[in-house]
Image: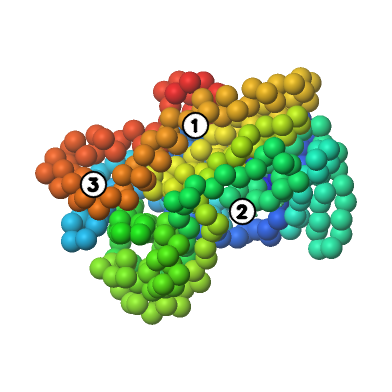
């Protein structure tokens, strides 16, 4: 398994529990933070529960409302939005759970996959090669471990935005515990949430031109102007960017290799479901990988299973992200939500919820 984010960890745990011998290789040393809104939607919480991993969410504040604003309009929508947990804590706890499930976890190890399926690993200059019977690639948006495979290319959407994020000190943003702050602006949107230790996670999707003209601190200070308590915290924060966000793979499986999580494709993160999709697809990929050890040809089923698991949610998230690009639609939506708050809550409720027939991601239709 390549990449110890939510997808790779769940894949490794599921495969190990199904009886496979698993090695999980991760480039970074943990704990590490990463650009993410840090909201784990109810569907993700349910996948973790079904996998017996509820304990990894210990101490994570519950999220009960979203404060959505644009221009001078603002509306509060009450909805179960899951929990908030820093990626430093979440990924390190998942990684530990993988070790406890019998997975051999190697951090600080960068990997590429050769065209013959051989895995080349590099840790602190030491290099070695493995020839696994199955490889699950969950190396995220910035992953390049499949670059040698001409059939598994990225297709980046021309209108794609860039992700941007930082973690600010406690109290930097005017925000209640358990509340998600979302602000939509021409050129993108930004979200903020209080983490388990009081620090504030800020994550945004920004048009490249806006970012180039104003710089990360400039654009974040402007978008968060009504909520930020001390501009200095924005100017001194360590802003980190991502590659282009909206993209898809030309294929999700080749013989011996399955692609899962963000590595399989990505839509803009407005609805905060990426980790839930990564957990669900990682879990399903791990089960399929364990099956492939005895039935190598079943890799062909993976693209259809992945689409069945995530297709509808990803389509809805993409549609919302596209609608938000029109200021007129955003203002109409906010006006409706202010006038009919119960209707707004009802429309927002299905986002990120577990599927009725499947939570752990066995590929059952939504
Ligand atoms: C601005 C923004 C806000 C977001 N907000 C939310 C939110 O609120 N809620 C939510 O659910 N999702 C959110 N997301 C999406 C979420 O961050 C991702 O969907 C999620 O991290 C995907 O998990 P993953 O395991 O697929 O990949 P990742 O978490 O990216 O993990 C991939 C891992 O692979 C490792 N890796 C990469 N290359 C190699 C290599 N060659 N060898 C070994 N290891 C490698 C990386 O170091 C990394 O640890 C947001 C994303 C952005 C950009």
Nearer the observer, 225 or 29: 225
What is the number of callouts on the image? 3
Instruction: State which tag comes first along the sequence, 2 or 1.
Output: 2
Q: Quadrant of residue 233?
A: bottom left
* Alpha carbon distance from label 2 to label 3: 32 Å
Instruction: State which tag comes first along the sequence, 2 or 3.
Output: 2
Residue identifier under label 3: 329
Give the SS element for disc 2.
loop
> In the shown orientation, is residue 35 left or right of residue 205?
right
> In the shown orientation, is residue 78 left or right of residue 259?
left
* Residue 142: mark: 2
* Residue 310: mark: 1
Q: From this viewpoint, is residue 253 visible? A: yes
Q: Residues within 10 Å of mark 3 (few under 14, many from 20)?
A: few
Furthest residue in direction left, as rendered: 339
In the image, residue 357 sits, relative to residue 323, either above or below, namely above
Q: Quadrant of the N terminus?
A: top right
Residue 299 position within the rendered picture, expressed as x and y whole percent measured from the top left: 70, 26
Nearer the observer, 282 or 51: 282
Disc 3 versus disc 1: nearer the observer: 3
Q: From this viewpoint, is residue 198 visible? A: no
- Asked if the residue at tag 1 contacts the one at tag 2, i.e. Cβ–Cβ closer than 8 Å, the answer is no
């Amino acid at each position: 398994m390549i990449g110890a984010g939510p997808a790779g960890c769940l894949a490794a745990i599921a495969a190990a529990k199904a009886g496979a011998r698993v090695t999980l290789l991760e480039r970074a040393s943990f704990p590490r933070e990463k650009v993410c809104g840090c909201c784990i939607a109810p569907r993700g919480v349910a996948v973790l529960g079904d996998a017996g991993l509820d304990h990894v969410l210990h101490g994570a504040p519950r999220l009960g409302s979203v404060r959505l604003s644009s221009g001078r309009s603002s509306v509060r929508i009450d909805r179960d939005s899951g929990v908030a947990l820093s990626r430093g804590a979440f990924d390190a706890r998942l990684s530990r759970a993988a070790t406890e499930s019998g997975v051999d976890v190697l951090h600080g190890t960068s990997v590429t996959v050769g065209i013959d399926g051989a895995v080349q690993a590099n840790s602190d200059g030491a290099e070695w090669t493995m020839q696994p019977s199955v490889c699950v690639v969950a190396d995220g948006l910035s992953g390049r471990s499949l670059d040698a495979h001409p059939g598994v290319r990225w297709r980046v959407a021309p209108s794609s935005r860039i992700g941007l994020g930082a973690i600010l000190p406690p109290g930097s943003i005017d925000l209640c515990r358990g509340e998600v702050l979302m602000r939509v602006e021409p050129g993108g949107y930004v979200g903020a949430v209080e983490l388990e230790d009081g620090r504030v996670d800020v994550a945004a999707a920004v048009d490249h031109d806006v970012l180039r003209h104003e710089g990360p601190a400039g654009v974040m200070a402007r978008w968060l102007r009504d909520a930020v308590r001390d501009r200095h915290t924005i100017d001194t924060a360590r802003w980190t960017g991502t590659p282009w966000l909206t993209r898809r793979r030309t294929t999700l499986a080749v013989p011996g290799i399955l692609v899962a999580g963000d590595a399989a494709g990505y839509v803009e993160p407005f609805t905060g479901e990426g980790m839930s999709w990564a957990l669900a697809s990682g879990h399903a990929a791990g089960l399929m990988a364990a099956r492939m050890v005895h039935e190598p040809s079943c890799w062909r089923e993976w693209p259809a299973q992945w689409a069945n698991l995530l297709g509808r949610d990803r389509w809805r998230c993409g549609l919302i992200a596209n609608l938000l690009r029109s200021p007129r639609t955003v203002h109409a939506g906010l006006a409706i939500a202010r006038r009919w708050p119960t209707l707004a809550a009802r429309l927002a409720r299905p986002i990120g919820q577990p599927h009725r027939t499947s939570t752990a991601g066995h590929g059952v239709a939504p």
